[in-house]
């Protein structure tokens, strides 16, 4: 049994990984992690930074994976959180994951964008979010949902855009798989190959047809790839 801990992207709850359960190999258990301030943890305070998110989630992983192998998956902002979760786990003396999947996010050591999108007025901020695709347009048309969703998105964009890379750390020891959508306008091919610079062991880059949210557009494709990477087809 391998537990696959999945960290959501900006604005999302753990529910975004609900479709994976039936498609993932029976020897792999999908564990979607809930970030503070949404879903089951709606009443919890938003994180101050990615380090705080990594501290929180690493404790959950340690409790859940004491006696089993585990892997990590994170998409977009979730990939950045996943990167820091790995180092939290290593700092605490926990065992290595069998594999780490980083998806839809440029490598963590690359310079951040100069603009702080989370500080934009609502109308401009919405336009930024809409550029990524997904179902945000439907959410923004509903005032109640929009009022609920915007603070979550801003909080997530803030911790991503204020992230400070820590240089000089030992490279990731376990195998790294990097996923991205070929039509994702938020990243470049070079952004994704740059993950190789923080990966000290095996490295693989896998492209899917689709946008930034290719993982929702091609659920069968990504779960088949994960099954293969973690040991056999379903």
Image (cartoon, rainbow, N blue to C red):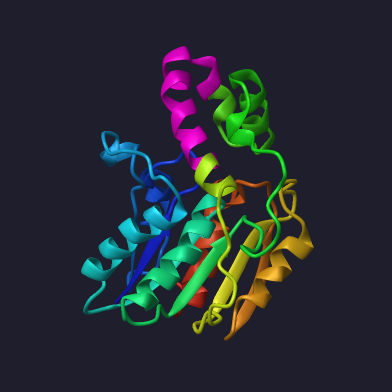
**Outermost residue, top side:** 143
Quarter of the image where the N terminus is located? bottom left
Direction from residue 45 to residue 81 in the image, left or right: right
Q: Which residue is rendered at x = 50% and y = 68% of the image?
A: 226
Let me know if residue 98 appears in the view.
yes
Instruction: Depth check: give the residue in front, 222 or 101.
Output: 101
Image coordinates of residue 6 in percent, x first then y, are: 41, 58
Does 203 sit above or below residue 213? Answer: below
Residue at (27, 40) in percent of width and height: 40
Image quarter where the C terminus lies is bottom left
Q: In front here: 114 or 70? A: 114
Q: Is residue 124 left or right of residue 91?
A: right
The x, y position of residue 24, in whole percent, is 41, 64
Above-or-below relation of 218 to 232: above
Would you say residue 174 sits in the magenta stretch? no
Position in image of residue 180 (x %, y %) = 65, 58
Vertical position of residue 53 compared to residue 72: above or below: above
Which residue is pictured at 59% across the width and 36% down the height? 134
* Chief secondary structure of the magenta portion: helix
Based on the picture, tell me whether residue 141 belongs to the magenta stretch: yes
In this picture, residue 76 sits left or right of residue 59:
right
Visible residue check, residue 70: no
**Image quadrant where residue 124 sits:** top right
Magenta span: 139-157
Residue at (44%, 19%) from the top-left corner? 147
Image height of 205 relative to 136, above or below:
below
């Amino acid at each position: 049994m391998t537990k696959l801990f999945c960290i959501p992207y900006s604005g999302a709850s753990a529910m975004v990984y609900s479709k994976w359960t039936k498609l993932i190999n029976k020897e792999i258990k999908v564990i979607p992690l809930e970030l503070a301030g949404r879903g089951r943890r709606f009443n919890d305070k938003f994180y101050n930074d990615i380090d705080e998110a990594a501290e929180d989630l690493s404790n959950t992983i340690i409790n859940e994976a004491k006696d089993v192998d585990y892997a990590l998956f994170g998409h977009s902002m979730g990939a950045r959180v996943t990167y820091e979760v790995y180092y939290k786990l290593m700092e605490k003396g926990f065992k290595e994951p069998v594999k780490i999947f980083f998806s839809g996010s440029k490598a963590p050591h690359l310079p951040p964008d100069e603009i702080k999108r989370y500080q934009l007025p609502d109308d401009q901020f919405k336009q930024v979010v809409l550029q990524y695709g997904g179902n945000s347009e439907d959410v923004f048309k509903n005032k109640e949902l929009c009022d609920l969703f915007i603070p979550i998105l801003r909080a997530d964009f803030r911790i991503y855009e204020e992230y400070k890379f820590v240089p000089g750390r030992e490279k990731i020891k376990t195998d790294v798989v990097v996923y991205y959508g070929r039509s994702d306008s938020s990243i470049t091919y070079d952004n994704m190959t740059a993950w190789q610079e923080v990966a000290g062991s095996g490295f693989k880059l896998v492209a899917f047809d689709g946008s930034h949210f290719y993982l929702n557009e091609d659920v069968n494709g990504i779960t088949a790839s994960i099954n293969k990477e973690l040991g056999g087809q379903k």
